[in-house]
Amino acid sequence: MEIYGIINIKNNSIYIGTSWDWIVGKKSHLYKLIKTNHPNNSLQNDFNIYGINCFKFFFIEEDGDDYFPEYRKVYWIKKFQKKHKMYNIHKKTFRKQINTY
């Protein structure tokens, strides 16, 4: 499992994601954002405001734990949220996950 990020270089907000292939994850996010059909409303709204050139995708790590990839994802969210607004933290269930790990 690969962990990647999407950063909005205008407001420094970050989304952390996981995928078997982070390039495939990138293409999927871009497709949905361009079609204005992304499930993360905050990410979609900022994409609509700032445009494609203000978003950069970056590789974080390859996680060897394919059974529990959320552990590492939550680790990176906690690390980044110290200095960045996170697009990930919008659902109550995900907040519970962060507090659990």
Image: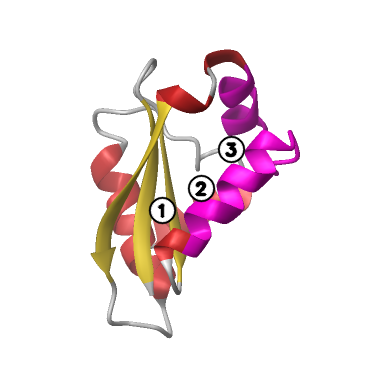
Does residue 54 show up magenta in the picture?
Answer: no
**Depth check, front residue: 55 or 42:** 55
Q: Residue at x 51, y 47 (%)?
A: 95
Q: Quadrant of the C terminus?
A: bottom left
Determine the secondary structure under disc 1.
helix
Magenta residues span 24-48
**Left or right: 76, with 91 as reference point:** left
Hey, what amino acid is under mark 3?
His
Q: Nearer the viewer, mark 2 or mark 3?
A: 3
Q: Are marks 3 and 1 in contact (CB under 8 Å)?
A: no
Image location of residue 79, percent across then percent down: 24, 45
Q: Are marks 1 and 2 in contact (CB under 8 Å)?
A: yes
- Residue 101 vs 99, above or below: the answer is below
Q: Quadrant of residue 3?
A: bottom left
How dense is the environment of label 1, judged by Cα within 10 Å: few (below 14), some, or many (20 and up)? few
Q: Quadrant of residue 66?
A: bottom left
Measure the C-alpha gap from mark 3 to mark 1: 14 Å
Tell me how many marks there are: 3
Q: Residue at x 31, y 28 (%)?
A: 84
Task: Determine which of the numbered discs, if any, sits on residue 88 in the image.
Answer: none
**Depth check, front residue: 79 or 3:** 3
**Depth check, front residue: 8 or 26:** 26
**Left or right: 11, with 79 as reference point:** right
Q: Which residue is mark 2?
A: 95
Q: Which residue is mark 3?
A: 90
Q: Which residue is mark 1?
A: 99
Q: Quadrant of residue 1?
A: bottom left
Image location of residue 55, percent across then percent down: 43, 30
